[in-house]
Amino acid sequence: MKSIYSLLLGIGVSGLLLAGCDKDNKNDGFVVGSDQEQTGGNDNQDNGVASSARNELYRPQVHFTPKKNWINDPNGMVYVDGIYHLYYQYNPQGNGWGNMSWGHATSTDLMHWDEKPVAMVRNQWGDIFSGSAIVDKENVAGFGKNAILAFYTASGEHQQQCLAYSTDGGLTFTQYENNPVIANTSLPDFRDPKVIWHEESGKWIMCLALGWSTQIEFWGSADLKHWEILSTFTTDAARCNIGQWECPDLIRMPYNGGEKWVLIVSNNPGGPVGGSGTEYFVGDFDGKEFKAMNLDYPLWLDYGADNYAGVTWSNAPAGRTLFIGWMNNWNYSGDVPCSPWRSAMTLPRELTLKDVNGSPLLCAPIVKELDGIAGAWRAAVAGEMEKAAAYEAKFAVSLDSNTSIRLANSFGEYMDIEVRPSADMLTVKRGSSTGKTDFHSLFSIPGIQAPLHKDGGEMILHLVLDASSVEIFSEDGRVSVTNLVFPQEPYNRILGVEGVEYRPLSSIW
Ligand code: FRU
């Protein structure tokens, strides 16, 4: 599975499974996937996952990682009784993609995560691919008031949508007896159900991605078990259709005193710097159809190389749109030098839709809960920050002239950021000076570019520097650039700008 990214590039997840999954293989997978993987999950808990140190080289200190093994997309995020649930694509058996299951972690503050036993493992319908979860407050599905309902793609011979429910607060799930709730034997890519409530039509809406055919389907249901197709969305904007469409989300957002709907679509390998990226469309949704406004697509939620497959929390506290992404890229994810785990999530973001120069722009700053793990702001003397698990730094950059910023450490490793207001561009240089890059030829990227969307004379940039990532934001999140890096120690000096302030972030483990 080491080269899953290249297989994904070439034929897509579904193609891979169709190619490699005759009946016998599938049965093999099922045997492993039922008993042993379940044991693997329990084993996690017996090992005291939550309390063990996570302090290996490159181990993120303020981002979620599992104690061991492979993760990709965040799945089934739902907020219930003060607890944020984060499920994720997980391989209970190893450090590469495979045996897809839903791993599980919980948090009360979006920062500290408690890893739980694996919530769902491969079954007779196939791998447990990505999906979403909701709280059934009215018991419309009949599994109990406030049951947590998970919708996921079972990926076996075909990709089909299945339902499972939890009556123990999201710890374990029972499969619905009449699965699949949406059968499919013809479409090669048909996956990643995101279910939301649509008040006006009194219906649950499910968005589904059709991979290489670059379409999103919307389905509707009153009882969460019977679904009918409502419409299909696609776009003529050719640049939006280079890769396969995956992991959609449909979000209602306040905008300019009214509201708009944002359709999030993950795209691989058509991302902003090649490989994986998360694009979005802004428009209206009437309970049946999504109609996009005529904007300059593609618009990217994050212009960095490493923020993919993100969606929002269901049932989030009133007024909040909370998002988390997979901090990696299918171009090289199978080779990033992490062991015994592989991959992290981004920091959670709080999405808002802002009118910037007359157009809607999706802003994605880090959630305010970061304050809970941060010390007091202080000045970086000559750009140097005192040793901490991770850092948040902020400084002003002029939008009248160019600025070159260098992030460096005591090993002589560095990453440069250039702000060129005349080109309305911020450029991150992720070359061989940044640390380890030789694990994959596509990892080194000389120019990762993000528009500044400037509308004033100055911009405050925020950086979160962890052991193997740099997230760059403007204060309101209109700039959002997430990149992995593998230096021998986190960058702890910021050179080239005056007045750098920082606050130490304490480890979440
Ligand atoms: C996106 C994705 C999803 C799929 C999952 C499989 O990264 O390809 O479309 O459900 O990963 O792990």
Image (spheres, rainbow, N blue to C red):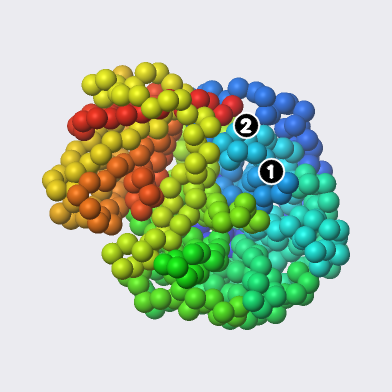
Please indicate whether residue 251 sits to the left or right of residue 178 in the image. left
The image position of residue 480, as x and y in percent, is: 38, 49
Q: Is residue 200 above or below residue 102?
A: below
- Secondary structure beneath disc 1? strand
Query: Which quarter of the frame holds ligand 1?
Result: bottom right
Q: Choose top left, top right, bottom left or bottom right for residue 35.
A: top right
Please indicate whether residue 99 sits to the left or right of residue 232 in the image. right
Circle 2 residue? 67
Tell me if residue 74 can be seen.
yes
Question: Which of the two residues, 164 or 84, is positioned nearer the viewer here?
Answer: 84
Eye-nearest disc, 1 or 2: 1
The image position of residue 462, as x and y in percent, is: 35, 39
Tell me if residue 98 can be seen.
no
Circle 1 residue? 83
Q: Quadrant of the C terminus?
A: top right
The image position of residue 430, as x and y in percent, is: 30, 40
Amino acid marked by disc 1: Ile
Residue at x-position 67% and y-position 62%: 153
Residue at x-position 36% and y-position 53%: 478
